Amino acid sequence: MRYLRKERNGSPENMPSVKISASVLNSNLAELGKEAAKIAENGVEYVHYDVMDGEFVENITYGSSIQKSLLPYTTAKMDTHLMVMHPQRQIKLFADAGSDIITFHVESDCNPHELIDEIHALNVKAGVAVKPNTPAEAVLPYIEKADMILVMTVEPGYGGQGFIPEMTDKIRLIRAEADRLGKDIDIQVDGGINTETAKLVKEAGANVLVAGPFLFKAENMKAAADSMR
């Protein structure tokens, strides 16, 4: 089982280093293996793998077997985002399919504290996601236990949406609480991220940036990723 290293090189302000996660939802799904290989070849740290069940969100994407099939094609870490109503049914499947981190939604039907423990017991990092209309306070109780908080900067369910600028306030609040607790936690953002919006979320305290169209439609993925950093 692969596992994300806990050591990170902090910035002078002691914030975790900036990393990029490429959302394959916006890739050429007919060539998913090649697209996963492209991610690592261009120095992008994570494959962002969105799982949608048609219940928690309207859309349906793909399952653990497809994620597992990507592992031989890429050396990038597998960043699994469960947009599902019952994440506890999925975590063992995705841990076995090579997830390095599994993120579930605080709005889903689960006990977040227990689910974080279950994910850690599978030797995988745990993330907690929050939708745009859910206040930051909903995820603050999990900062000390989780490895990452994901702030959705669009409404989840479909790729290619526009960035919601008000989400920067949510990021600031979460980073401030993490600093107060002395927790060196990753804050991930997902939705409408490009060079310009990357500046806004980094200034607010985010350090893991998910991008889809901006990376996969770029003539040079590496240059696009570097511009976000």
Image (spheres, rainbow, N blue to C red):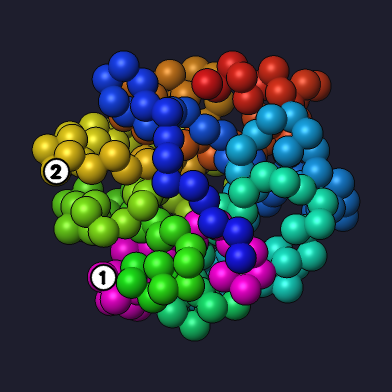
Is residue 131 in sight in this rendering?
no
Residue under pointer 2: 181
Q: Helix, strand, or loop for circle 1?
A: helix
For the N terminus, the quadrant is bottom right
Q: Is 188 on the left or on the right of 47, as rendered?
A: left
Query: Looking at the image, which residue is at 44% across and 58% down?
Result: 125
State which mark lies toward you, 1 or 2.
Answer: 2
As drawn, 83 above or below 23 = below
Is residue 208 in sight in this rendering?
yes
Q: Is 50 on the left or on the right of 153, as rendered?
A: right
Q: Quadrant of residue 66?
A: bottom right
Q: Helix, strand, or loop for circle 2?
A: helix
Residue located farthest toward the left when viewing the structure as drawn: 180
State the separation of the CA atoms marked 1 and 2.
17 Å
Q: Is 6 on the left or on the right of 1, as rendered?
A: left
Percent of width and height locating residue 122: 48, 72
Q: Nearer the viewer, residue 119 or 59?
A: 119
Query: Looking at the image, which residue is at 79% across and 65% down?
Result: 69
Region rendered in magenta: 95-115
Residue under pointer 1: 113
Q: Is 158 on the left or on the right of 26, as rendered?
A: left
